[in-house]
Amino acid sequence: MPPAVDRLTLGPLATNCYVARSGGASAEAVVIDPSGTAEEIRTALAVVGARCVAILVTHGHFDHVTALADLAEQTRAPVHAPAAERALLEHPERFTPPGINVRPCVPEVLLEGGERLVVAGIELDVLSVPGHSPGHVAYWRESDRVLIVGDVMNGMNLITTIPGLHEPPKPFTPDPARNRESIRKVAALRPELVCFGHGPPFRDPDKLARFADQLPA
């Protein structure tokens, strides 16, 4: 049965949070990149009649984790996050712009890439895709070729909001060359559905491959 993946666009930078279930009738869900507020996410869970049993983080940039600590506390769901992003999650005040409050969170499960997770009845491979951030990971379900890629790529122009494939902004990507290697890595998987941190879902593996091929070295 294909998973049900609901996209919530939340928070100060219109960041995508995903609620994934093993199927439309499943009462268990995994929440990926809890942006916005815990109340918004729990409302979405209630609408589909599911409870959060796990929380996954692609990377520690503040806009992807504004609801992380509250949601983890309120649901008691374990947090899975990249080990190299731990400082961003445990000390967000060091990395968050003034005026935005992100509470610290200590992940229960630290990821390096290469792990296989089974959460809410969904089997996901953890892919190491650094560049936009040092420990960035993506989540890949090979059975139906669904990829949750975080900010390795954007699915829209962040200024105009017009849909399309884009590299993440260089001012927020410490290692653009390494990030391009990560783009090539995920494009080679030929995902049938790509879920971005910013922008609408994408369903064209051929176009993704061409985008990766034309990137500079």
Image: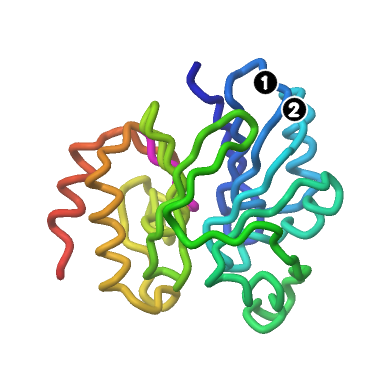
**Residue appearing at x 78%, y 68% in the figure:** 103
Residues tagged 2 and 1 counted as in contact (Cβ below 8 A): yes
- Percent across and percent down for residue 105 are 75, 66
- Quadrant where the image shows the C terminus: bottom left
**Residue appearing at x 60%, y 59% in the figure:** 81
Q: Quick one: 21 or 156, which is closer to the camera?
A: 21
Report whether residue 22 is seen.
Answer: yes
Q: Amino acid at mark 2?
A: Ala
Dot label at residue 136: none
Location of residue 92 with respect to 75 vertically, above or below = below
From the viewer's perspective, tell me whether residue 16 is left or right of residue 27. Answer: left
- Percent across and percent down for residue 106 are 73, 66
Image quarter of residue 167? bottom left
**Residue appearing at x 82%, y 47% in the figure:** 76
Mark 2, secondary structure of its residue: loop
Tell me the crowding category of disc 1: few under 14, some 14 to 19, or many 20 or more residues within 10 angstroms, Cα based: some
Residue numbers of the magenta segment: 193-197
From the viewer's perspective, tell me whether residue 2 is left or right of residue 189. Answer: right
Residue hosting label 1: 26
Residue hosting label 2: 50
Report whether residue 199 is seen.
Answer: no
Image quarter of residue 97? bottom right
**Residue appearing at x 69%, y 75% in the figure:** 92
From the viewer's perspective, tell me whether residue 16 is left or right of residue 38. Answer: left
- Percent across and percent down for residue 196 are 45, 48
Location of residue 30 with respect to 110 vertically, above or below = above
